[in-house]
Image (spheres, coloured by chain):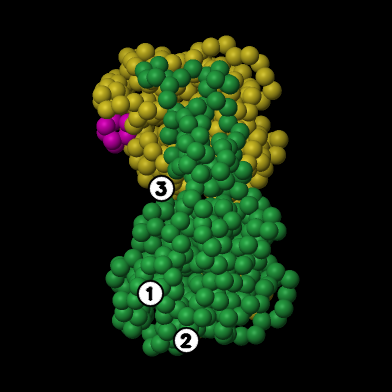
Chain colours: A green, B yellow
């Protein structure tokens, strides 16, 4: 699990940046796409990079003891019901994954209920939901490691089965509370700034949710946030599915595959993953900017710019699916566009060609 | 050409809004996608709406007399060279259109050079480039009408050939100057606020470009901006390809087909189209927010929210192609997602179902 992550290929990055400037367009005119293309080349170690496909969405599901504090208007049973919905293909992530040709794999890392076995569902419970993070550590250190390992294994499996790009997904009623706590812990931003309405709490409930997050942070104290010691922070603030997602990100990076983050839960997991393996960051792309305020804080901290901003707050992997075509477009541009020379197009007259 | 545009189907819109609230997700959690789905239903007159496909990108090309004022670092010949690049399939719009399964049709409405006939190129020159808008009207009123008619016909043809969604594209060295002039004329925003660097001018050139736009606006004066009289403003400030685009938008709306705008040139055309046929607006979606400052001003004026914001400033239809999957996703969500009832998912416990 803690095997190293290789550095990016700087030569491939330079080749891609140089090629961007030779393509038949004003230099820089494809905006964010150009930087994405450069990084995809650096990840793949070649220019042009392969188009990131086929895609696999891993939806990690887990329950949250903190639900006892009334942080969500939705009952815990919805986690299991939504897993059934994913397996049946009726959820938003299924619809959006079908559109982009992505497979959806659901992993039960910590759902409190027993789930019926089904194709596309991997049962790998580390425990049946977390403990209440506002009063005690959400999970044991060993459970955090087990969840990380599981996520890493899922990434390895999906890549072994041919995935060229990994997308994160999550399901867990209560998991925006755990995400807010982790984002506060890893960025230093106060709880009030990173805690949001999740699936839809009102002002009073939101104030209560901030108090709950603050309690968890006080209890956690100033545990080390860097290196393997950071697993204790993860265990304290939890989210079995968040821990598994962090492992999933590391697993993708270890295999030099681009990983597309969904929303705030994935962003929290990314902070954990980067604390554990700093180079992991270079393999991550932010699919979208969630409405949840912690998302922007986490992405700023990570230095990742979201590809899509459609005021989504659903999770499941929906934002990652919507962003996938942008990632693929960036690779295609490098692979398929004509250059000024090849197309016989005159360059601008006032400056030397790049 | 000036045939009416039917109003949206409000019953279909209400049905879609009601369905959005029954789908297995927190109400509103799909953000912008939900409103897009409602409007697609209202356009189609049914819920769920058909997925907007197949897509056709119409790239209207024309040259600009104002280039004599030194408003672009690129020579006029690039317009014709890029048309050849489009026809050969090597430009950015070709790459991005292929990714989303869209056909690209190029229409020469006013390129100054003679173009070699080729499959995918429609030659329909209204004139060989515009006159210099800073000193005289860019085109005659009759030429503006001819360009509008042409664009409208292209939309009709593409829909007759099966297109379920129309995307705008444009090519014309100098056309951000004409777009800025039109955006200023139709929104009332000062030239300095809507004139941008286009394909890449420096500070001094930008200041000069603003002066050029101001001259054109002074010359145009306070011509009527509403109804058919607005064609005189269009003729004065021009862009043969912009006039054709305005007709294309009206043509799509007349056939009740959603039209996805690309960047600032399409946004300028949309202001013209809506001045001519106010209801046209209801059929338009803003593909992206161009870096060009006039784009945001035009979209605000139109009340359209861009689907993508990737700091693009290339034109050609690239932003529209990148946004198409978002439009399609909005329709698919309504057509394919399970409802709380059908999936047996419990709703939130603190409020009555919608």
- Please identify the residue farthest to the top as the structure is shown: B114
- Subunit of label 2: A
Q: Residue at x 58, y 37 (%)?
A: A48
* Magenta stretch: includes residue A10: no
Rendered view: B23 above or below B192: below
Taking depth in this image into account, of B44 and A238 the one nearest to the observer is A238
Q: Residue at x 60, y 51 (%)?
A: B328
Task: Give the residue at mark 3.
Answer: B303
Place of residue B128 in the rendered image (x, y in percent of width and height, measured from the top left):
50, 13
Question: Marks 3/1: CA distance?
Answer: 38 Å
Q: Residue at x 42, y 53 (%)?
A: A304
The N terminus of chain B sits in image quarter: top right
Q: Which residues are magenta?
A: B188-195
Q: Which mark is residue A181?
A: 1
- Subunit of label 3: B
* Residue A166, picture quadrant: bottom right
Q: Which mark is residue B282?
A: none
Task: Give the residue at mark 2.
Answer: A131
The reply to whether label 3 and label 1 mark residues of one chain is no
């Amino acid at each position: 699990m803690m095997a190293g992550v290789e550095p990016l290929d700087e030569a491939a990055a330079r080749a891609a940046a140089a090629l961007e400037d030779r393509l038949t367009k004003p230099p820089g005119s494809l905006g964010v796409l150009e930087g994405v293309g450069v990084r995809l080349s650096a990840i793949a170690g070649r220019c042009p990079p392969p188009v990131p496909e086929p895609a696999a969405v891993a939806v990690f599901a887990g329950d949250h003891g903190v639900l006892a504090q009334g942080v969500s208007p939705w009952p815990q049973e919805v986690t299991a019901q939504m897993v059934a919905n994913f397996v049946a293909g009726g959820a938003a992530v299924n619809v959006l994954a079908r559109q982009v040709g992505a497979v959806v794999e659901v992993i039960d890392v910590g759902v409190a209920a027993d789930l019926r076995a089904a194709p596309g569902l991997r049962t790998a419970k580390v425990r049946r939901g977390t403990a209440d993070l506002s009063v005690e550590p959400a999970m044991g250190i060993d459970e955090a490691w087990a969840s990380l390992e599981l996520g890493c294994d899922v990434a390895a499996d999906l890549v072994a089965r041919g995935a060229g790009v990994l997308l994160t997904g999550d399901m867990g009623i209560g998991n925006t509370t755990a995400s807010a706590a982790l984002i506060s812990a890893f960025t230093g931003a106060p709880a009030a700034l990173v805690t949001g309405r999740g699936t839809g709490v009102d002002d009073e409930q939101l104030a209560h949710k901030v108090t709950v997050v603050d309690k968890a942070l006080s209890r956690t104290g100033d545990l080390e946030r860097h290196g393997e010691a950071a697993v204790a922070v993860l265990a304290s603030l939890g989210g079995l599915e968040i821990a598994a997602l962090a492992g999933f990100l590391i697993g993708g990076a270890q295999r030099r595959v681009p990983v597309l983050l969904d929303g705030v839960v994935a962003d929290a997991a990314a902070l954990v993953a980067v604390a554990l393996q700093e180079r992991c960051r270079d393999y991550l792309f932010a699919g979208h900017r969630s409405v949840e305020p912690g998302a922007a804080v986490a992405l700023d901290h990570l230095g990742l710019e979201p590809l899509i901003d459609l005021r989504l707050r659903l999770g499941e992997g929906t934002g990652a699916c919507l962003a996938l075509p942008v990632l693929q477009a960036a690779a295609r541009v490098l692979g398929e566009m004509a250059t000024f020379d090849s197309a016989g197009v005159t360059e601008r007259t006032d400056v030397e060609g790049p």
